[in-house]
Amino acid sequence: MRRVPIIAAVLVIAGIAAGTALPKTAVAPVVAERQASMKAMASAAKTISEIFAGKVAYDAAAFKAATETIRRRSGSAMVDAFPADSLGEPSAAKADIGQSQEEFAALARHLESLAAALSDAADDAPEGITEAMRMKPGMAMGSSLLGKRAGGAADSDPSKIPAEHVFHLMLQNCTNCHAKFREKRQ
Ligand code: HEC
């Protein structure tokens, strides 16, 4: 079966493989915590991608744990991790988050719903990745993965689309938020 090589590229975009580490000194605890939380999500996303790619054997519990790592850290928990007085230097969080609270929160909530759908998918697949979880040929790549608009796929119900596709939408969500609200430090 054909796997999805594009995942590797997307993980780079999401800041997982790239050298995006920031100096670990002189940031407030709330900043250090959210950066650690983002890193934990990146590591969980890597695990999920490796499972889909067949690099790591599927294990429903491990798959679910990774999705839950992301679910718990998104939604309102993520919004709360970016209080107004913590934005801007020396954090990479742009000050615009303060003026664009609604959009920022919508991205965080969308991530939560995508992670919840993946978590549910693990419950439905105790033995292995099912065909229903796989992205179908012709699905998605152009339109969803590389879609430009934040929240572009927010209207579709993630519980009704294959888990692998949901995962791609998730990575797209990470990238969308970073493009808009995270300072580039390369
Ligand atoms: C709603 C917006 C938003 C979403 C969604 C989001 N991020 Fe982030 N992310 C940020 C912001 C803002 C920063 C910069 C935080 C800082 O430096 O204070 C960041 C930083 C990071 C970092 C760098 C952490 C560090 O050590 O400095 C990584 C890695 C990361 N995000 C991964 C992810 C992954 C993976 C996802 C998706 C599963 C994701 N993010 C979803 C906004 C978001």
Image (cartoon, grey):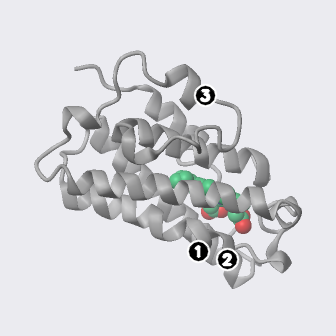
**Label 3 SS:** loop
Distance from Cα at disc 3 to Cα at disc 1: 27 Å
Q: Position of residue 49 (x, y in %)?
A: 37, 42
Q: Quadrant of ligand 1?
A: bottom right
How crowded pointer 1 is (Cα within 10 Å; few <14, some 14-19, many 20+) is rated as some
The answer to which of marks 3 and 1 sits earlier in the sequence is 1
**Residue 184 visible in the current orientation:** no
User: Is 182 placed left or right of 2 in the picture?
Assistant: right
Residue that numbered label 3 is attached to: 146
- The number of numbered discs placed on residues in the rendered structure image is 3
Q: Position of residue 5 (x, y in %)?
A: 40, 26
Instruction: Kindly check if marks 3 and 2 are in contact, taking CB atoms under 8 A apart as contact.
Output: no
Residue that numbered label 2 is attached to: 80
**Label 2 SS:** helix
On the image, which quarter does residue 54 sit in? top left
Whether ligand 1 has any atom under 8 Å from the Cβ at mark 1 is answered as no
Nearer to me, 119 or 181: 119
Looking at the image, residue 159 lies above or below residue 106:
above
**Residue 69 visible in the current orientation:** yes
Q: Position of residue 160 (x, y in %)?
A: 38, 41
Kind of residue at disc 3: Leu
Instruction: Kindly check if marks 1 and 2 are in contact, taking CB atoms under 8 A apart as contact.
Output: yes
Which residue is at 85% across, 79% downward? 85
Looking at the image, residue 167 lies above or below residue 7:
below
Q: Position of residue 168 (x, y in %)?
A: 47, 38
